[in-house]
Amino acid sequence: MIKELAKSIREYKRTSIATPILVALEVVMECIIPFIIANLVNQIKNGCSIETIIKYGVILVIMAGLSLMFGSIAGYTCATASCGLAKNLRKDMFYSVQKFSFENIDKFLTSSLVTRMTTDITNVQNAYMMIIRMAIRSPLMLIFAFVMAVIMGGKMAWIFLIVIPVLGAGLGIVIYKTMPLFKKVFKKYDNLNSSIQENVKAIRVVKSFVREDYEQDKFNIAAQDVRNDFTKAERILAINNPLMQFCMYSVMVFVLSFGSYTIITSHGLNLDVGQFSALLTYSFMMLSSLMMLSMVFVMITMAGESGKRIVEVLSEQSTLSNPENPLYEVKDGSISFEHVSFKYSSKAKRMALSDINLNIKSGETIGIIGGTGSSKSSLIQLISRLYDATEGVVKVGGKDVKEYDLESLRNQVAVVLQKNILFSGTIKENLRWGNKNATDEEMIQACKMACADEFITKLPNGYDTYIEQGGANVSGGQKQRLCIARALLKKPKILILDDSTSAVDTKTDANIRKAMREYIPETTKIIIAQRTASVEDADRIIVMDGGSVSAIGTNKQLLAENEIYRDIYISQNKAGDQVEN
């Protein structure tokens, strides 16, 4: 885990190395100061001159100044390194997610990815800040202060060696008890974020069904669950502080009592006032270092679980990869399915697609129709290799899709999915997702083909109209037409419309199909639809049923020969008597 996270330090290695060095210098300065003060106290006790006092004063000011300077620079380099690590981790995680196949994405909830990229990375950032500064400062301060305490106080300083194992044992128990709780609580954070995301995304549905109270109760339960686990963990962590305080005050009582007794009984021969004051200062230094060290361990304990969750995403390998010598050119838009079967998970009991055999010529218009759950969308997702077939071979342009460079294949297969997504930005910016170099004329032509130009020109700012996130300020039909125009700008060899005209009227639907037939005759067009009117003029229609191909033919052939298609047609057209005749 640490090795994987360390890869994201990269350009911040210098500041990461500089911080411990600066912290070490700061500690040295701080540990020398009490020693100089002890000598000054003894000099004053012996009746030194004002020149001696000024000399010691100047040395102390220089030492304090150096300590402040080293500490300030260390604070700057520490902040730079930790924030830089967080930035790189977010970047690496985001890039990693972009490479995921649909199968990989199915493993992680969206809310979980958001939690990992925010809360978990913040925990790792805070822990890293502690590690390169406090985790260096505290042990060094502990060692240097102990050495100086032995020099100044002799055997009395060994009391600290008795305290350290007690504190270590207490800290070990705390970590052992809290680690499982933190593991549970981060998963519950995912559920909490999932509740928020789902509610915000479906806010219109929530309000239309007046279910605000239900959603509030659901959120409160999730929030209370997180609170309970965190409270339990914090209660255990809270034991650490009183234990530290107890050990600290026990040591202070011993040092004060035994030190005062030694000064009085030996008349300052075994321990003088200057040494005693330095010993007290070093006592505080050591105990405060132990307190800081315990805080570091607590933070690392929290960050440990967060780090594992981050590494899960970073180390996840895409189930889809390029072959050794990939093909970069797709010859044409021909498609072939050879005994193809597919299931979404290796654990799934049944196949989503079973023994599919299809041959589609380049430039053909193919309609796909079938009932809900007949795996129409599953079929077309194999063409652009969003998933790989479990069995059999899918070919595009006469070659197995696994032989192509993924980017090259997907650039030639434009898919307008069932769930249409627009991004925040202008209409032009959204259209250029299809072709980043598209000219205004090309965009207008694509929009005319998709019957989108007619409503865009009526908008106050035309093609420069701003689209809200998810296309919230346009209707479902307008969103679909913009997504079709965006796909057309790719000038693909294969165009797949996955029920992407369901929100437009039948006249507009017919106009879009006519435009595609006239303007892109060489492009293979696959139209998945719920209504027969959208596919009846296709060259061939594929009827899907339960993950298998039930029939293939023209509208006329299927009406005469296929019961499933005929039932759908009759139910939609109310023309049973005409069909029978």
Image: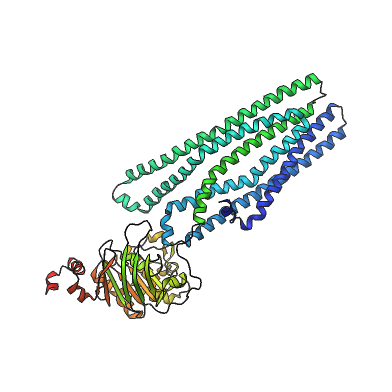
Instruction: Name the colour scheme.
Output: rainbow
Residue 391, by quadrant, is bottom left
Of residue 433 and residue 111, the one placed in the foreground of this image is: 111
Residue 449 image point, x, y percent: 35, 75
Give left or right: position of 445 versus 121. Answer: left
Does residue 219 lie above or below 91 as drawn? above
Residue 196 image point, x, y percent: 40, 49
Residue 163 image point, x, y percent: 65, 30
- Looking at the figure, which quarter contains the C terminus? bottom left
Q: Is residue 124 visible?
A: yes
Give left or right: position of 78 versus 208. Answer: right
Q: Which residue is located at x 53 percent, y 38 percent? A: 176
Give left or right: position of 298 versus 372. Answer: right
Number of numbered callouts drawn: 0
Give left or right: position of 569 versus 401. Answer: left
Residue 300, by quadrant, is top right
Does residue 313 lie above or below 245 as drawn? below
Of residue 423 and residue 89, the one placed in the foreground of this image is: 89
Residue 329 image point, x, y percent: 46, 77
Q: Is residue 410 visible?
A: no
Residue 360, by quadrant, is bottom left
Does residue 14 lie above or below 231 as drawn? below
